[in-house]
Image: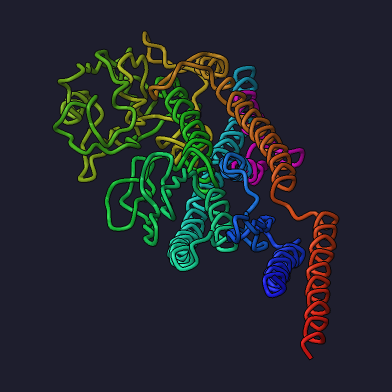
Amino acid sequence: MSFASLNIAAAALKAQQQAIRVTANNIANVNTPGYSKQTPDLGTMNPERIGGFSFGRGAQLSDIRRAVDPFLARARAANGSALGFSTTIEQGLNAVENVFGSLSAPGLAANLDAFFQGFQQLANNPQDAAQRFNVRARAQDIINGLSDMRQQLVTAQTSADAAIDQKLAQANQLLDQIASLNTRIAASEIATASQANDLRDQRDLAVNKLARLVPIQVINGQNSEFIIQTRGGDLLAQDGTARHLARGGVGPTGFASIVVAGTNSPVQGLDQGGDIGGLLALRDQKLGGYIASVDSIAANLIFGVNQQHASGAGLTLASSVTSGQPAANPAGPVDADPNVPFAGQIVTGSFRVHVYDAAGNPTPPGGTVINITAGATTLNNVAAQLNAVTGITAAVDASGRLTVTAAAGGAVGFSDDTSNFLAAYEINGFFHGRNAADIALDPAIAADANRIAAGRIDTGASAHPPGDNTVALAILGLQDKAVSFDGTAAASLHDRATGLSSRYGTDVAAAKQDRAFCQAEAESLKSQRQAVSGVNMDEELIAMMKFQRAYQAAARVIQSTNTMLDSLMGLIR
């Protein structure tokens, strides 16, 4: 029996020593990121039966439990994806704040208001050449504003796309790390028949970091089986195998898509969370939407102003006019040319061309009507009709541009365009271009502000009185007139500009609110995890004392048993 007591005491010493080791490990990792508190489970050894009685054989360390809550772990991963998504969008939007105007630099709406105010002043004094210089200056301001705004947004969009590559590299490193940990965990748990707690903590930490980058779902199978998928169902890691994320072909947004390496299918569900999802949403939905709005404002401004200006006349008339937009196919219908951005606005109608001789006399008075039939009239047809007018020649050059030239010393003007042909092909136009990427002043106006039209040519006598302000008033009316020349919903230019600024402000406020909510949730989940898995130094010190006392008691059993054996040996001697 004395020897049995020694064995029990020896087992107790070993068990308490192992428990102290577990506690020491907790204390050592109190500040280790991702570490989960471990708890030693002590259990009785299998008893032995002697003389009809069952005698215990002492205690042993039966398990080392890792304090984790799987539901809390999933919630933290989901929160990490949401926090990464909202933070990335908020930071990206804050980075382009200056694009939408500040105290030191007026915004788009202010530039538009100044442009239309210039036409209002011109309408009040249409004979004043100085007002035309003012209109041209204000027009250049709005051109610069639209171009700069678009370029800054495109630069931010390109930066967001470049940042995606960096995040993909980080995600791939984490996938490799998780796959390696899967292999090590499986090998360790097979060899020891117990959970590899520290390795599992490292894997959980890597999974949380991956979730911050990519929205994922984790599937834990039997034993050590471990699978990571995107929320769209694409497999990223399974046991010891990792599948990398890579760039694929150019997608509908104009940027390279994201695919699983070795495949051509875009990964699904990446835009639902994480830093990468936030960059995708920022690049395509936010910045891409702003760029589309800026282009829409520019397109409607270009065609809306040109539509009025093409039928007007400035203080001076031109001796030669060349279309700003070249036709891809001069032999094809003018309303279907793929090279002319506003060709679709051309309808069946007509315009008048007015010819003046060297003395300024109209030949003939009232001008000549040029007919346009949608789906039938070609640019070559228009040139032929113009060539039939006395005093001018017309030709389509090799680049597809139509040029109308008056006889020596003469001039040419236009009026009453009901077909939109002149505006679409930028003949006698004010602006040049299709959107904010290439908007510019018409070269003739850039060279001579007196070419800016404030009034119209009289269709009866072909007179163009300098005091007429009908065109200036018509252009001024565009500020608050709901129009759409690019397929978007009809709205005034003023509403489009203010709506863009309001949309940006709303997006910033929403992103800030989302980030604040996710941050608060993250703090709450962190506290919950600390309560479940965190190391409490007071508890560990108490546990240490408890195991220490048990160790001392086991040592005392050995001492007592040794004394008994000494007494017994003394009797034998």
| Quadrant into which the C terminus falls | bottom right
Q: Viewed as shown, does residue 349 lie left or right of 332?
A: right
Dominant SS of magenta comes to helix
User: Residue 514's spot in the image, x, y percent?
Assistant: 65, 33
Classify 165 as above or below 409.
below
Q: Residue furthest bottom?
A: 573
Q: Viewed as shown, does residue 506 lie left or right of 226?
A: right
User: Residue 407's spot in the image, x, y percent?
Assistant: 28, 34
State whether residue 174 appears in this view: yes
Between residue 542 and residue 250, name the one nearer to us: 542
> In the image, which residues are magenta?
89-118
State whether residue 443 appears in this view: no
Between residue 324 and residue 103, name the one nearer to us: 103
How is the protein colored in the picture?
rainbow
User: Residue 333's spot in the image, x, y percent?
Assistant: 18, 26
Does the magenta-highlighted stretch encompass residue 116?
yes
Q: Name the residue rendered at 44%, 35% in the picture.
A: 435
Does the magenta-highlighted stretch encompass residue 34?
no
Between residue 367 and residue 346, name the one nearer to us: 346
Between residue 146 and residue 356, name the one nearer to us: 146
